[in-house]
Amino acid sequence: MRFKTLGSSGCSVSTLCLGTMTFGSETDEEGSHTQLDRFVAAGGTFVDTADVYSDTESETIIGRWLATRPSDVRDQVVIATKGRFPTGAGPNDLGLSRRHLTRAIDASLHRLGVDAIDLYQVHAHDPFTPIEETLRTLDDAISAGKIHYAGLSNFTGWQVQRTVDVAASNHLAAPVTLQPQYNLLVREIEWEIVPACIENGLGLLPWSPLGGGWLTGKYHKDERPTGATRLGENPDRGVEAYDRRSRQQRTWDVLDALGGVAKAHGVSMAQVALAWLRDRPGVTSVILGCRTLEQLEDNLGAAELDLDESEITALDAASDPGAADYPYGIPGVQQRSRRVEGGR
């Protein structure tokens, strides 16, 4: 297993992170503990959860696992969780206000059974709470020893920049990470969000690295999903999602490129997709989302897989979203040049 620091912080984490959204719902407690044990045995140190995963049960399962493991295991694991979405029925049981975040942090500490949360992430932007209030609350939690670092999740580029600027101007602890959706089929964050994070020293923690199963090769043209898949469990949702993605030729171009690289290495398509993402600029750790131990075993194979330059180029070309030339691409540069030359 390889390691990187959490953005500009000094805390090191494994470049693969065990995501636990399935714990307590698609994966029972015994299976969840087995995944945690296997991940740690493979050298993994980074575990990500959230208070709303399985209606708080994911945090509780992780807490019971930590309580029954040796101290040397507990001491090596870096725990990340999140707060923002509703955990109750009241009007203040959600959002990024001081009132809600303070209670949410304390509740997560209790469920996880830890003295401090290593990385506490706000789960999404809150348009109703001033970012100053949110940042001061997180800064106070760091000063109180309840959390070690703060992070963001699902923020846009301007929201990242605004948050960093407000933290700097008020001498508050700045976020060290951003958790976005990012994979070979979802690269639009490279237009604004990735540059904003790199510029400000935030490490990226991509979720859905396998595109909801698409990048494992389990879906095929003219063959709608059935059975125990993230798309197939709900037939209506599965058909709609499959139809939307399958109509895009880019989807099949990416899968063809993935399949070629996987065959050359003798590995799964999922491992290639994870290795590609792990080495993207700004990425600190890729969050694995596994329902079963078998899926986790396969995903862990990406830890030491290296792609050569020609393979990366082929995957980049096949997955290029290619939709936003202006103002990000050459046309934008040309437009700006003409304005300067014409004095307008």
Image: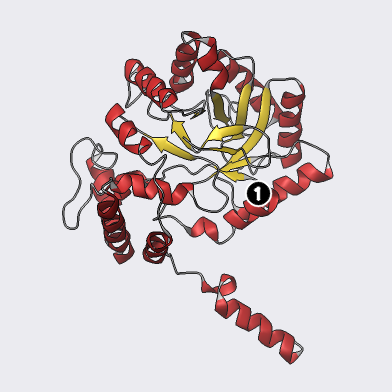
Residue kind at label 1, given as amino acid type: Val
- Image: 262 above or below 334: above
Q: Residue furthest bottom?
A: 342
Residue at 27% from the left image edge and 60% from the top image edge: 256
- Image coordinates of residue 158 in percent, x first then y, are 65, 54
Can you give x and y, in whole percent of width and height, for residue 23 in the image? 39, 24
- Mark 1 lies on a secondary structure that is helix
Residue 130 shows in the view? no
Please state if 26 lies on the left or on the right of 280 as rendered.
left
- Percent position (x, y) of residue 224? 18, 50
Whether 183 is drawn above or below 69: the answer is below
In this picture, is 291 found above or below 130? Answer: above
**Is 45 or 125 nearer to us in this picture?**
45
Q: Residues within 10 Å of mark 1 (few under 14, many from 20)?
A: many
Colour pattern: secondary structure
Q: Which of the 4 quarters of the picture holds residue 290? A: top left
Relative placement, left or right, of 334 versus 298 is right
Task: Tell me: residue 103, above or below residue 307.
Answer: above
Q: Looking at the picture, how far across and down is residue 106, in whole percent? A: 63, 18
Residue found 53% across the figure and 42% down from its top: 205
Name the image quarter holding the C terminus.
bottom right
- Residue 99 lies left or right of residue 216; in this view the side is right
- Residue beneath disc 1: 160
Asked whether the viewer can see residue 22, the reply is yes
Displayed quadrant of residue 231: top left
Residue positioned 37% across, 35% down in the render: 300
Q: Which residue reaches farthest left?
A: 223
